[in-house]
Image: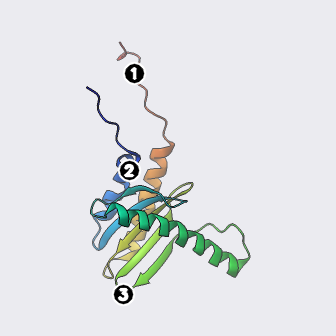
């Protein structure tokens, strides 16, 4: 009997748990730079997560172009992009090479706390992805 290997979404969605526990945070998505879902909060439908991932790539690219238009710097490094509406805040932060983390929070959410925790989780994700795979001890091998 073989055990199914978890999908990439299952493997990195742990990054979202602390964010989703923050007051006011409603949804979170980890997306590739080309708009594919790498992880999403469980209560977000697959279709919605895919739309968010696609829009995350678009918003991030637009924010870079917008910054370039103001500064003439062709390769600005974005810290975060925030979209505010009467429904709440969409926050996007880079989460490593070709990856972004997006969160949607209610208008009552403490944005400073949410932004800080997003950076903490991005750092944790970077460490996890950079860590080499664990090798079994020689003494345990049979």
Disc on the earlier residue, 2 or 1:
2
Percent position of residue 113, x then y: 37, 71
Disc on the earlier residue, 3 or 1:
3
Disc on the earlier residue, 2 or 3:
2
The numbered mark at residue 9 is: 2
Q: Dot 3: within a 10 Å radius of its alpha carbon, few (fewer than 14), some, or many (20 or more) residues?
A: few
Q: Dot 1: within a 10 Å radius of its alpha carbon, few (fewer than 14), some, or many (20 or more) residues?
A: few
Q: Quadrant of residue 103?
A: bottom left
Q: Quadrant of residue 90?
A: bottom left
Residue at coordinates 64% horizontally, 74% vertically from top-left? 65
Which residue is labeled 1 in the image? 137
Q: Dot 2: within a 10 Å radius of its alpha carbon, few (fewer than 14), some, or many (20 or more) residues?
A: some
Percent position of residue 18, x then y: 32, 59
Residue at coordinates 47% horizontally, 47% vertically from top-left? 127
- Mark 2 and mark 1: Cα distance apart in space: 29 Å
Q: Secondary structure at mark 3?
A: loop
The numbered mark at residue 86 is: 3
Q: Residue furthest front?
A: 47
Q: Residue furthest right?
A: 72
Percent position of residue 69, x then y: 69, 79
């Amino acid at each position: 009997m073989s055990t199914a290997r978890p999908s990439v979404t299952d493997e990195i969605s742990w990054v979202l748990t602390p964010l989703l526990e923050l007051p006011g945070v409603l949804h979170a998505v980890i997306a590739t730079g080309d708009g594919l879902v790498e992880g999403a909060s469980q209560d977000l439908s697959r279709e919605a997560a895919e739309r968010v991932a696609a829009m995350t790539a678009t918003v991030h690219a637009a924010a870079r172009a917008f910054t370039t238009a103001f500064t003439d710097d062709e390769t600005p490094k974005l810290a975060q992009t925030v979209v505010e509406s009467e429904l709440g805040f969409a926050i996007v932060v880079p989460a490593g090479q070709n990856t972004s983390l997006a969160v949607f929070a209610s208008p009552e959410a403490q944005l400073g706390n949410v932004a800080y925790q997003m950076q903490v989780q991005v750092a944790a994700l970077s460490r996890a992805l950079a860590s080499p795979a664990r090798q079994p001890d020689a003494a345990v091998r049979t």
